[in-house]
């Protein structure tokens, strides 16, 4: 247990579990780093032109997701619609079946992805379990 009532860290200081492949983002496992157990939260950092959020839906987890662009500039595609997302933009996707993705338009673009299933106790996603277990 920490001696402090809080912990502060820069997103860039959270280690990524593996080197990103060229054209892809660096995944920063925020939830795991802090030991958060009530909701999912991760950060992705990418360079201009690189994938920032892989194309996906959340039908397996039933998560609604909120993306917060904290630095740089991103272009989201949500249900086939383009969304311009400079730093400070929030993109909310309530329907788990909606397909979403994003690419970085500027170097150092960072997005926080926050999600959970409404009305249910949080469970770690299967893709995250392969890195850190339950």
Image (cartoon, rainbow, N blue to C red):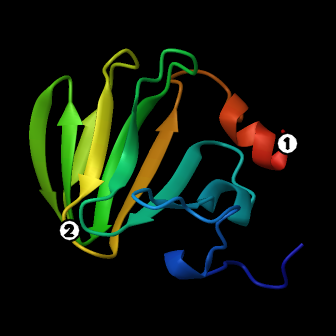
Checking the image for residue 16, the label placed there is none
Q: For the C terminus, which image quadrant?
A: top right
Badge 1 is on which residue? 133
Residue 123 seen in the current view: no
Residue 3 image-quadrant placement: bottom right
Q: Are marks 2 and 1 in contact (CB under 8 Å)?
A: no
Q: Residue 27 or 116: which is nearer the viewer?
A: 27
Residue at 28% over, 61% down? 69
**Label whose residue precedes the other's in the sequence (2 or 1):** 2
Label 1 packing within 10 angstroms: few (<14), some (14-19), many (20+): few
Q: For the N terminus, which image quadrant?
A: bottom right
Residue 114 seen in the current view: yes
Label 2 to label 1: alpha-carbon separation: 32 Å
Q: Say if 37 sits above or below 79 in the image.
A: below
Q: Say if 71 sits above or below 97 in the image.
A: below
Callout 2: helix, strand or loop?
loop
Badge 2 is on which residue? 87
Q: Say if 41 sits above or below 86 in the image.
A: above
Residue at 67% over, 78% down? 6
Left or right: residue 123 compared with residue 84? right
Residue at 41% over, 23% down? 57
Image x and y of residue 39, in percent: 59, 42
Image x and y of residue 96, in percent: 40, 19
Residue 45 image-quadrant placement: bottom left
Residue 30 image-quadrant placement: bottom right
Image x and y of residue 82, in percent: 10, 38
Label 2 packing within 10 angstroms: few (<14), some (14-19), many (20+): some
């Amino acid at each position: 247990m920490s001696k402090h009532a809080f912990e502060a860290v820069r997103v860039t200081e959270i280690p990524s579990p593996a080197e990103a492949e060229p054209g892809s983002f660096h995944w920063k496992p925020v939830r795991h780093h802090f030991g958060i157990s009530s909701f999912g939260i991760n950060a992705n950092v990418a360079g201009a032109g690189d994938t920032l959020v892989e194309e996906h839906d959340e039908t397996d987890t039933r998560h609604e997701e909120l993306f917060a662009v904290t630095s740089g500039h991103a272009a989201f595609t949500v249900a086939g619609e383009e969304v311009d997302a400079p730093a400070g933009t929030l993109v909310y996707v309530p329907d788990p079946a909606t397909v979403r993705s994003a690419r970085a338009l500027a170097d150092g673009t960072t997005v926080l992805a926050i999600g959970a299933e409404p009305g249910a106790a949080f469970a770690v996603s299967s893709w995250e379990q392969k890195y850190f277990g339950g």
